[in-house]
Amino acid sequence: SGISSAKAQRMLGWTAKRSWRDYLDADGKALPRG
């Protein structure tokens, strides 16, 4: 992709180890962040 994992991590506060499934429920809605 055109964006690096490090940049994405800084921007979004996520790590490449985690996938979008960690942040979306079965309906595709964002899960509340702890």
Image (spheres, grey):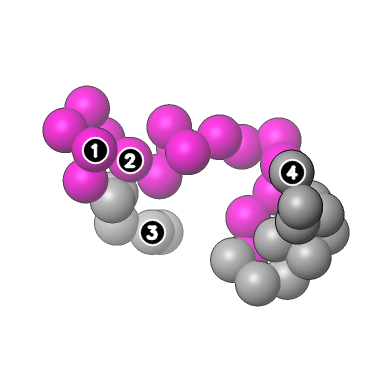
Q: From the image, state whether disc 2 or disc 4 is nearer to you.
A: 4
User: Quick one: label 3 or label 2, which is nearer the N terminus?
Assistant: 2
User: Quick one: label 4 or label 1, which is nearer the N terminus?
Assistant: 4
Indicate left or right for 4 with 34 as reference: right
Q: CA distance from mark 1 to mark 3?
A: 15 Å
Q: Secondary structure at mark 3?
A: loop
Whether 29 is drawn above or below 17: the answer is below
Q: CA distance from mark 2 to mark 4?
A: 21 Å
Q: CA distance from mark 4 to mark 1?
A: 22 Å
User: Quick one: label 1 or label 3, which is nearer the N terminus?
Assistant: 1
| Label placed on residue 1 | 4
**Pointer 2 local density, CA inside 10 Å: few below 14, some 14–19, many at least 20:** few
Percent from the top left, x then y, of residue 11? 65, 72
Figure label count:
4
Query: At label 1, which amino acid type do we have?
Result: Gly
The residue that disc 1 covers is 28
Q: CA distance from mark 3 to mark 4?
A: 25 Å
Instruction: Please identify the quarter of the rendering in which residue 32 is found.
Output: bottom left
Q: Quadrant of the C terminus?
A: bottom left
| Residues shaded magenta | 13-29
Residue at 40 percent across and 45 percent down: it is: 23
Magenta: main secondary structure equals loop
Q: From the image, state whether disc 3 or disc 2 is nearer to you.
A: 2
Q: From the image, state whether disc 4 or disc 1 is nearer to you.
A: 4
Residue at 73 percent across and 70 percent down: it is: 10
Mark 2 and 1 residues: CB-CB less than 8 Å, in contact? yes
Query: At label 2, which amino acid type do we have?
Result: Leu
Mark 1 and 3 residues: CB-CB less than 8 Å, in contact? no
The residue that disc 3 covers is 33
